[in-house]
Image (cartoon, rainbow, N blue to C red):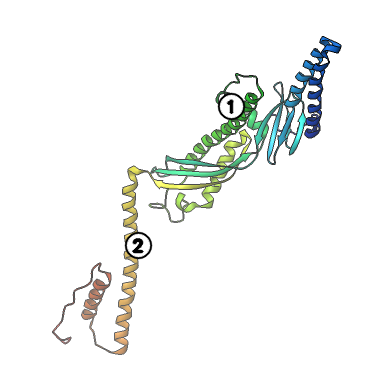
């Protein structure tokens, strides 16, 4: 069974107490040099030993904010994760790997994929993710190599250089995690996009599509992403498709198809309304006995009214100088 994250159980002291103690210890080391003429070389040796010890004590001080943690590693051995917020001091020989458990946004740029029916489409994703398990995040994926390469090597032994290097390592560690999430998000997005068609053109009306799927497609994305990120101790809180379009090479053709579908639907509505109006007109003429129309005249009237109501352009009036009896 793989090792999991557990709480750090080692010695932890109050950071303010150790800070005050170390300042006194440093003052004592400096003061020992002033007794050189009285006690000889031993004062110099003691002073140097005290100052070296204060450097190690400084290394043990750490500060944690809410939703931050430190993974404790003792010469390569994982000793637990420290999550308490505040100012503390721990064994200076422990390597304290800083981690953030705060939620982070990631905008995955649109990528070209083929949908269920093979149409090339562009689809983008925005998600919210965070760390869940510090052990898996640090030791189950090879984020350490990326961090070491990108952070560079310390070429100086001064305190400022050490602090700057530590800050770069902490920033690059979270950047390495984000890069892992980005790659896995790309793969999950391709997988989900291939399960659905772009729209229901040529498909059954009730079939789920990328355009109409909404929350169901987003839930599928979250599930696939969490399956891929579980091994790295990360979780996706929310994922949504934020960009969806046909690829440029077929966009013009698909636009014409959509326009044709819209025209057909509009024509159906126009014809349906025109038929209803013609029927209403004939019923009213017959009810009020305005004119007696035989079947031939009714057919002619229906034809003329449908032409007028369904035509794209205004009908040209024609005067009939004959009578209805001829």
Q: Nearer the viewer, residue 245 or 33?
A: 33
Q: Residues within 10 Å of mark 1 (few under 14, many from 20)?
A: many
Left or right: residue 219 versus residue 61 is left
Q: Residue at x 65, y 34 (%)?
A: 99
**Quarter of the image with the N terminus in it:** top right
Q: Residue at x 81, y 10 (%)?
A: 41
Q: Where is mark 1, residue-wise? A: 147
**On screen, 288 above or below 143?**
below
Q: Nearer the viewer, residue 90 or 27?
A: 27
Left or right: residue 39 versus residue 249 is right
| The label number, if any, that marks residue 265 in the structure image | 2
Q: Residue at x 81, y 33 (%)?
A: 17
Q: Residue at x 34, y 59 (%)?
A: 262
Q: Nearer the viewer, residue 253 or 13?
A: 13
* Residue found farthest to the top: 41
Q: Residues within 10 Å of mark 2 (few under 14, many from 20)?
A: few
In which image quadrant can residue 266 be found?
bottom left
How many numbered circles does the render carry? 2
User: Helix, strand or loop at disc 2?
Assistant: helix
User: Can residue 312 be spotted in the picture?
Assistant: yes
| The label number, if any, that marks residue 268 in the structure image | none
The reply to whether discs 1 and 2 touch (Cβ–Cβ < 8 Å) is no
Please provide percent x and percent y for residue 96: 70, 28
Please provide percent x and percent y for residue 181: 55, 36
In which image quadrant can residue 56 be found?
top right
Disc 1 and disc 2: Cα gap in Å?
58 Å
């Amino acid at each position: 069974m793989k090792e999991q994250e557990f709480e750090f159980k080692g010695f932890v002291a109050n950071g303010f107490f150790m800070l005050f103690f170390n300042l006194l210890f440093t003052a004592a080391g400096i003061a020992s040099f002033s007794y050189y003429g009285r006690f000889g070389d031993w004062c110099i040796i003691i002073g140097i030993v005290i100052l070296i010890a204060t450097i190690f004590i400084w290394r043990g001080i750490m500060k944690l904010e809410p939703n931050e943690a430190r993974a404790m590693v003792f010469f390569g051995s994982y000793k637990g994760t420290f999550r308490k917020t505040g100012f503390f001091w721990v064994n200076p020989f422990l390597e304290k790997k800083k981690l953030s458990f705060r939620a982070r946004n990631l905008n995955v740029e649109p990528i070209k994929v083929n949908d269920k029916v093979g149409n090339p489409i562009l689809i983008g994703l925005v998600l919210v993710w965070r760390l869940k398990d510090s052990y898996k995040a640090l030791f189950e994926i090879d984020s350490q190599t990326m961090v070491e390469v990108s952070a560079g090597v310390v070429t100086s032994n001064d305190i400022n250089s050490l602090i700057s290097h530590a800050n770069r390592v902490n920033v690059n560690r979270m950047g390495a995690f984000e890069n892992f999430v980005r790659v896995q998000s790309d793969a999950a997005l391709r997988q989900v996009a291939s399960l659905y068609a772009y729209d229901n053109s040529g498909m059954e009306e009730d079939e789920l599509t990328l355009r109409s799927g909404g929350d169901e497609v987003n839930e599928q994305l979250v599930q696939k992403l969490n399956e891929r990120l579980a091994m790295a101790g990360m979780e996706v809180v929310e994922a949504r498709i934020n960009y969806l379009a046909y690829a440029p090479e077929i966009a013009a053709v698909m636009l014409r198809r959509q326009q044709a579908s819209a025209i057909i639907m509009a024509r159906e509505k126009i014809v349906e309304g025109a038929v209803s109006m013609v029927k209403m007109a004939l019923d009213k003429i017959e009810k009020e006995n305005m004119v007696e129309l035989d079947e031939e005249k009714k057919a002619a009237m229906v034809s003329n009214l449908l032409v007028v109501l369904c035509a794209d352009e205004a009908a040209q009036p024609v005067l009939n100088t004959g009578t209805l009896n001829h």
